[in-house]
Image (cartoon, helix red, strand yellow):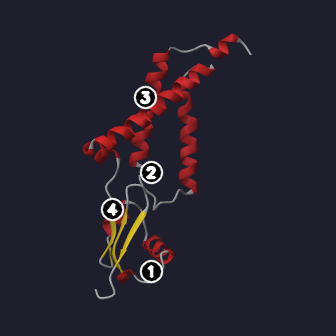
């Protein structure tokens, strides 16, 4: 192992700029494309993330070959991630940009087809989730919504309703 393994082979500013550009590009892609998926990560989604990770590695690191280069790049990505989390915690406007609002899929036993189409969710997907929760009929659901984290919230109707 040579001494160059422990020295920067690329300017630290180049690493910061490359890492920041690729981070924000990927952030926008994931925010717009992989926004939600009924709380599950499918094989296609996992494969997509793996391919994107591999493809973006060269764009971020350029000719970086040393340990400090890699550590600096990882640090840039971590800083952006923590900063976005902190900003969205402190500011509701930023949170609104970063986290999608909940999406109502069923209201008073009626499927909300426009919302379902928007997220490519089928009636079968919804009925499957309801069965997992022990709910037999759509009429038993007051509200079912897809939360910003991809999880489902189901509020059942009262027996008297």
Residue extending furthest top? 3
Distance of label 2 from label 1 (alpha carbons):
28 Å
Between residue 137 and residue 85, name the one nearer to us. Answer: 85
Distance of label 4 from label 1 (alpha carbons):
20 Å
Of marks 4 and 3, which one's residue comes earlier in the chain? 3
Mark 3 closeness class: few <14, some 14–19, many ≥20 residues within 10 Å = some
Foreground label between 3 and 2: 3
- Residue 151 seen in this snapshot: yes
Of marks 4 and 2, which one's residue comes earlier in the chain? 2
* Residue bearing mark 4: 103
* Residue bearing mark 2: 34
* Residue bearing mark 3: 20
Q: Are marks 2 and 1 in contact (CB under 8 Å)?
A: no
- Rendered residue at 36%/66% (across/down): 145
* Percent of width and height locating residue 55: 56, 35
In the rendered image of this protein, does residue 53 appear above or below residue 5? below
- Left or right, 1 with reference to 119: right
């Amino acid at each position: 192992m040579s001494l160059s393994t422990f020295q920067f082979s690329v300017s630290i500013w180049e690493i910061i700029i490359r890492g920041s550009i690729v981070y924000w590009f990927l952030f926008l892609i994931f925010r717009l494309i992989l926004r939600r998926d009924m709380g599950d990560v499918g094989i296609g989604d996992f494969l997509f993330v793996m391919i994107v990770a591999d493809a973006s590695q060269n764009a971020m690191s350029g000719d970086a070959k040393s340990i400090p280069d890699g550590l600096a790049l990882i640090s840039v990505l971590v800083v952006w991630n923590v900063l976005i989390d902190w900003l969205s915690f402190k500011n509701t406007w930023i949170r609104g940009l970063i986290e999608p609002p909940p999406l109502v899929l069923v209201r008073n036993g009626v499927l909300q087809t426009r919302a379902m189409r928007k997220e490519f969710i089928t009636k079968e997907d919804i009925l499957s989730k309801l069965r997992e929760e022990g709910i037999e009929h759509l009429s038993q659901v007051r509200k079912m919504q897809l939360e910003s984290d991809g999880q489902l919230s189901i509020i059942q109707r009262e027996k008297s309703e």
